[in-house]
Image (spheres, rainbow, N blue to C red):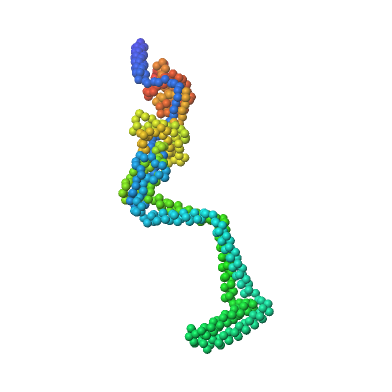
Amino acid sequence: MKRFVIIVVVVAVIAAGGYYLLQRGQQQRQQAQLADLQTVAVERGPLTASIGATGTVRANQSALLNWQTSGTVESIYVQAGEQVETNQDLAELQKNSLSQNIILAEADLIDAQKALDDLLEPASQLALAQAQQAIVDAEKQVEDAQTRLNSLKTTADQADIDSAQATVIILRDQLDKAQKDFRPYENKAEDNLVRANLQAALSRAQQNYDNAVTRLNNLKGTASATDLSIAEANLEVAQASLEDARQKYDDLVSGAAQEDVLRLQTRIAAIEATLKLPKIVAPFNGTITRVNTKVGDQVGPGTPAFRLDDLSHLLVDVGVTEIDINRIAPGQDATLQFDGIPDKTYDGVVVEVDSVGTTNQGVVEFQVKIEISDPDEAVKPGMTAAVNIVVDQLQDVLIIPNRAVRVLNGDRVVYILSNGQLSPVNITLGVSSDTMSEVLNSDLKVGDQVVLNPPQNFEVGGGPPPFVNQ
């Protein structure tokens, strides 16, 4: 029994010594770890949250200006770096080197413009009077043609028919007598005076007889189908002439028809476009940034001539992921930095946000357009810009460094150091920037020392290991 007690005592002494050494080693390790901790005080202050992206500087508007026809360059009116205005002539081809249709276009333009001017000029009093007289004449022709047709279709009184019948008989007798008188001289020479007089008398007798027969037939209503067709055709022609005369008068009174004006205006526009082919003009205000042509060059359609850029507004297009795009809106401020312009930051503003995204290598991005507010000569189109778009600006909020945030059991926490003890504090984050975050709901207070680099296996709160009974 005594031996057992001694053994128990010896074991207890060894255990107590081991525990002491273990606790002392743990404390030494914790002290060493505490000595390596980096801390920063919780504070209140401003917080600017931004979204970063990269893009390339471009001009507000750019154009590559090419020659539109073949020829020899005669004149160049600008040089690289020169400011130009809309519709300013930049270069021109020699006229004698152009195709025939371009050379003749000037004469075509004069003719078309004169035709348009004449069309738009109000009608004179003389023209109106002539048009009215043409209507009167046409109405008379219609009336005569209608009377003629009616007479062919209407039977006359018997007295008129009898009178006409008697006239036919008398004129037939005169015709027979004229034929009988002419027959002995029929074979005489044509220059025989008697023959000529008798032939003239025969012709008159034949004409009088034919007219009398026609009149008798008309009175009897026995006009031939041919006569009726001719009379109806004459009436239709007269009616068409009357309609045409009235239309011409109406056109003079109401002015030119809109379709005629439009046709001539279209023709003039086409000719003017042809006349512009030998020239290159500025389509907008800008700066000549490249000159690709020289005097004497032989050029053709599509040959490069100039590059024109509107450098009054410099823009940067950046891609923003779908996660961040709803935090961006026109009017937000931005900052821009360039590798080629060290130690300088430029200001910008969001001017446009695309409503439709595009997929690039499996990532959906939305284009955001930034305008540089304070560009200088150092900023050039083509430069790469690092852009930070300011999406939130807060004042006097509780802020902590992003480096201090950890995840413990699924919750966000920070570790604070107080009296040599390290303990976690749950936090709820609000707005974040690249380096700092807003704390919305937490037991943190200003002045607490949050740890930036808590060790992974640190014994939180001190005390004995969990496997040691106290």
Is residue 132 shown left or right of residue 451?
right
For residue 266, above or below residue 161:
above
Q: Which residue occupies the extreme left position in the image? A: 296
Instruction: Identify which residue, 380 or 439, lies in the foreground.
Output: 380
* Quadrant of image for the C terminus: top left
- To which quarter of the image does residue 59 belong? top left
Coordinates of residue 88 in the picture (x, y in percent): 40, 44
For residue 400, above or below residue 63:
above
Would residue 365 be seen by someone viewing this image from the given angle? no
- Tell me where residue 56 appears, x and y as whole percent: 38, 37
Q: Residue at x 41, y 29 (%)?
A: 434
* Quarter where residue 172 is shown: bottom right
Residue 298: in sight, yes or no?
yes
Residue at the extreme front: 193
Quarter of the image for the N terminus: give it: top left
Q: Position of residue 369 (x, y in %)?
A: 43, 37
Give the tally of numbered discs: 0
Q: Nearer the viewer, residue 113 or 333?
A: 113
The x, y position of residue 241, in whole percent, is: 56, 65
Q: Residue at x 68, y 77 (%)?
A: 157
Q: Please state which of residues 358 and 259 is positioned toward the viewer in this rendering.
A: 259
Q: Residue furthest top?
A: 2
The residue lying at 63 percent from left, 79 percent from top is: 216
Q: Is residue 168 above or below residue 64?
A: below
